[in-house]
Amino acid sequence: MPRLLILLTLPPDVTEQYRQQLSRKFPELTIDVCSDKAKAEDAIKAADMLLTFGQMLKNLKFDIKDAVNLKWIQALGTGMDGITDQPSLKPSVTITSLHGVHGAPVSEAAIAGMFTLARDIPRFVRNQDTQTWGRWPAKLLSEKTCGILGIGVISEALAPKCKALGMKTIGFTSKPRPVPGFDEVCGMSDFIKRVPEIDHLVLLTPYTPATHHMVNAEVFAAMKPTSFLINVARGGIVDEDALVAALRDKKIAGAALDVFENEPLPPNHPLWSFKNVLITTHQGGFCDTYVDLAMPILELNMRCFLDGNLKGMVNVVRAAS
C-alpha cells in the first residue's frame, strides 16, 4: 500500500483533519502522522509521500536522507525553503506547493498588522491588564501609502483591500506590469528611491538568495520615522540586526513581524523588548478554513500521484527527473 507521512507541528486537531479527510478520500493509503523529529526520522524510511511545511522541516532541522522510497513532497505552503534546499533531496522526487490559497488569510494578516500598529492596540491591551485608562490619537490608514514588496496572489488580494481603506498602493516586482488594485507597479530597481514615500511597507516577496536581507540598514535609513514595517513573508528577507538598530534609534515607528530568521524567536532576542513591535508566531496563513482551502489541491495531486499521472499535478515546483 502507498504510504504517506504527514509531518506537521500543528495542534493535533488540525493535523487530524488532514489525516481524516485523506483517509476518507483515499482508503488505500497507509498514513503515518508525526509532530516530532525522532518519530519522523523513523517514519520517513517507509514513506512514498510527504505532506509538510518547508518551514517546519527547517525548524526541526529535519533531513530526508533516509527517505529511500520518497517520490513526492506536497508542501502545505508556498515557500520552498526547507524543502528544495534539502541536501539529500533526490532528483526523482516531485515537489508541489499550495500556491493560490493564501490570498485571503495572509492579506488579512497584513491588514491586521497595519491596524494594530496604527492604533497602537498592544498599548490598549497592556493598559487593560493594569486597568489603566489611557487615550491617544489613532493614525489613520486612509490617505496613507502602502508599499508592497513582491507581487503575487497575496499582493493581488491585499492591494484592493488597501484601496478600499483609502490608501495609495505601490507595488515592487522583478516584472513590472499593470495589476488591479495598485496605483503603481515599479521594478525592484526603484524600490530604495520610493521607500521614503511609504507609510506601511508590507513584505510579500519569496525568500531567495537574491532577497536575503533585502530590507536592511539602507532601507531603514530611507524610511520615514513615522512608517511601519509589516513582514508576513519570510524572516531572512529582513536584516534583523539592522531592524533592531532602526527601532532603537527610532528610524521607523514600529513593526508587525510574523516571521523570523530563526523560529521560534529565541526568548532573549531583543525584538521581544520593543513595545512598538507586534510579534506573531508565523500565523499569517494559518486560519480556521486552511484545511478546506488546501484539500482541493491535495486531492487532485494525490489522485494524480496514485494514478501515475504526474503530469496532471498542479503547482509543480520541481518535476521528477
Image (cartoon, rainbow, N blue to C red):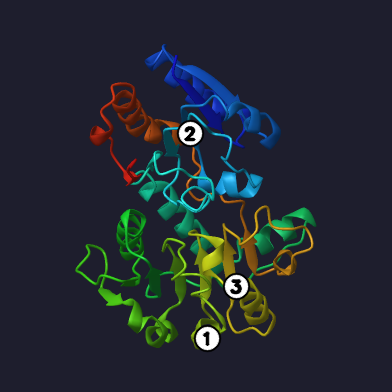
Using the rendered image of the protein, determine whether residue 26 is visible from the camera's viewpoint: yes
Identify the residue at horizontal 50%, vertical 51% (top origin). Answer: 284
Name the spot of residue 313 as percent of width and height, x first: 28, 35
Measured from the top left, where is residue 50 in percent x and y?
Answer: 49, 33
Q: Nearer the viewer, mark 2 or mark 3?
A: 2
- Identify the amino acid type marked 3: Gly
Question: Callout 3 environment at 10 Å: few (<14), some (14 to 19), or many (20+)?
Answer: many
Question: What's the residue at 41%, 54% (across, down)?
Answer: 107
Q: Which residue is mark 3?
A: 254
At 23% from the left and 33% from the top, the residue drawn is 312
Real-space CA distance between mark 1 and mark 2, rounded to the nearest whole angstrom? 39 Å
Q: Position of residue 35 (x, y in %)?
A: 64, 32
Mark-to-mark CA distance, 2 and 3: 36 Å
N-term-proximal mark, 2 vs 3 = 2
Instruction: State the residue at coordinates (36%, 55%).
Output: 154
Name the residue beneath numbered marker 1. Answer: 218
In this rendered view, identify the residue nearer to me: 172 or 313. Answer: 313
> In which quadrant will I find the N terminus?
top left
* Element on which disc 1 rests: helix
Q: Is residue 176 left or right of residue 139?
A: left
Query: Quick check: 8 above or below 58?
Result: above
Mark 1 or mark 3: which is in front?
1
* Three-letter code, disc 2: Leu
Q: Is residue 71 left or right of residue 34?
A: left
At mark 2, the secondary structure is: strand
Q: Tag on residue 51?
A: 2
